Each structure stands twice: as C-alpha cells, then as structure tokens.
Amino acid sequence: MNIILLGPPGAGKGTQAQRLQTDVGMVQLSTGDMLRAAVKSGSALGQKAKDIMDAGKLVPDELMVGLIEDRIAQPDCAKGFILDGFPRTEAQAEALDEMLARTGKKLDRVIEMEVDEQALTERVVGRFTCARCGTGYHDKFKRPRVEGVCDVCGSKEFSRRKDDNAETMKTRMAAYRAQTEPLLPYYRAKGVLKTVDGMAAMDEVYRQIRAVLAGA
Ligand code: ADP
Ligand code: ADP
Ligand code: ZN
C-alpha cells in the first residue's frame, strides 16, 4: 500500500509516519528529512536547498521530483511507502502520478490531517527530535519518558530545527495555503482522499489512520 500524509507544517505527519513505519513496515519517505540530510552532508542539493528551507519557502519542483523518484525506485519501497511532505505542489503531484504509472505502482490513499491553524505554531515551536535516531518529541505534548533521554535509543542529544520558529511559520503556512492546499481537491477528484482529525491526541489520530488503511 502506498499513501500520502497531507497537512500543514506541524500537522503530525512525521509523528504518524514514524509510527506506521515501526508497526506496519511501510517506508517513511520524508522529503524534509532527506533535504536536511543533504544540507548536513553539504551535497549540491543541500547547498541549493539550505537558504530556501531556512526562509520557509519551497525547494524547486524539479529538485524534489528527482529526489523522490530515485528514492521510490529503491527496493525497500516495494513493500509500500508513506509520503510525508511530498507532493507539495500540483506540479509535484502530477509528476508523482506520472512516475507511478510508468513504474506500475499506484497511490492507494491520501490522508488529510485536518488541524486548526492556531495550534500549529505551538506544535512546531515546541518540536524537537533525537539527534541520533530521529524520534520526534514535543516540549508539552510528548516529552521523553525519562527527562533528557530518548525513549527509543537512549541518546541524550536532541536537536531543534532552525525553521521551527513563529516568524518562519508565517511563510511556511502561506506556502501551504497557496501551493499545497489545492492538492486536496486534486486528490478528492481522484477518489483517494480521506480525512482524519489531526487535533485529536496522537493515539486517536493513529487509530483513525489505521482505520482508513483498513478500508473504513
Ligand atoms: P509534521 O511532520 O506534520 O510537520 P510532526 O509530526 O513533526 O508534524 O508534529 C509536530 C509537533 O507536534 C511534534 O513536536 C509532535 O510531537 C507534536 N504532535 C504531533 N501530533 C500531535 C498531536 N496529535 N497532538 C499534539 N501534539 C502533536
Ligand atoms: P513540515 O512538515 O514541518 O512542513 P518538512 O520537514 O516537511 O516540514 O519540510 C521542511 C522544508 O523542506 C520546507 O519548508 C521546504 O523548504 C522543504 N521541503 C520539504 N519537502 C518539500 C517539497 N516536497 N517541495 C518543496 N520543498 C520541500
Ligand atoms: Zn533516539
């Protein structure tokens, strides 16, 4: 099964994708994580993406399409993938349709995570991740079980994203509204769109997603 998690920054896409990856074995394809890894490695892509990401704008479609196309072609994606952060524009959605058709794959569901805009800034400003294994946390909504220690790998180092501040959130939200939100009618028209309540507690959101995947 191949799915997209669609929602604004801070909606909970990464949180739910990580959980699905662990439980169901689908592969999480987070374009944000891939780009941050490229920035860290100093690759050509990373150099092009860095300032754009720090400003909260979108990286050009042709770079993103190339990145995801290479990733989807890897053997591990054959067991099913979760797109988290891609597509973000109609051009990316069209390119995805085209590459799936060409490789004999299909998109089974697009899951919209519906959230109140006011909640998003609080979510992203409080977000942090384990620097070693990438597990996501939140200052208020998901603290590690033992203070300062990652639940999953025991690391004591955490990191925060430079773009997770109230100012950059304004640009990111504007990009979402102008360029990504039009994907909702795009996928609704294809009959693959389902909506879950992204304002619910994490376990409840997960339950709703599992129900959608089970065909409800
Ligand atoms: P996205 O990948 O959509 O940008 P994340 O999954 O990283 O969003 O979630 C953003 C922040 O909000 C994280 O710190 C996460 O722990 C927290 N979060 C995720 N889902 C919920 C939820 N349902 N309720 C409260 N906080 C949440
Ligand atoms: P969030 O889930 O909080 O919106 P991401 O980690 O998905 O953040 O993305 C971080 C940044 O990486 C975006 O603001 C954008 O600059 C860039 N980015 C990620 N995915 C894409 C994409 N599909 N198209 C263009 N830019 C992207
Ligand atoms: Zn960890």
Image (tube, rainbow, N blue to C red):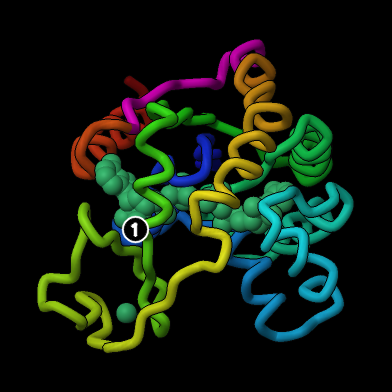
Position of residue 107 measured from the top left corner of the image (x, y, whole percent): 61, 34
> In this rendering, is residue 86 above or below 176?
below
Residue 108 is a magenta residue: no
Please tell me which residue is depicted at 55% across the width and 68% down the height of the picture.
162
Q: Does residue 81 appear in the picture of this structure?
A: no
Give x and y (percent) for residue 154.
Answer: 23, 86
> Relative to 80, is 196 on the left or the right?
left
* In the image, the residue with mark 1 has its CB under 8 Å from the nearest atom of ligand 1: yes
Q: Say whether residue 198 is visible.
A: yes
- 199 and 184: which is toward the camera: 199
Q: Give the range drawn in magenta.
A: 188-198
| Left or right: where 180 falls relative to 63 | left
Q: Give percent across and percent down for residue 49.
A: 78, 65
Residue at x 25%, y 61% (from the top left corner): 139
| Residue 135, picture quadrant | bottom left
- Report which quarter residue 44 is drawn in: bottom right
Q: How many marks?
A: 1
Residue at disc 1, secondary structure = loop
Q: In which quarter of the image is residue 67?
A: bottom right
> What residue would you read off at disc 1?
126
Q: Position of residue 118 (x, y in %)?
A: 39, 32
Q: Mark 1 packing: few (<14 Cα in 10 Å), some, or many (20+)?
A: some
Between 208 and 72, the one nearer to me in the picture: 208
Residue located at (51% from left, 55% from top): 79
Which residue is found at the position 68% from the left and 41% from the top?
87
Q: Which amino acid does label 1 sit on?
A: Gly
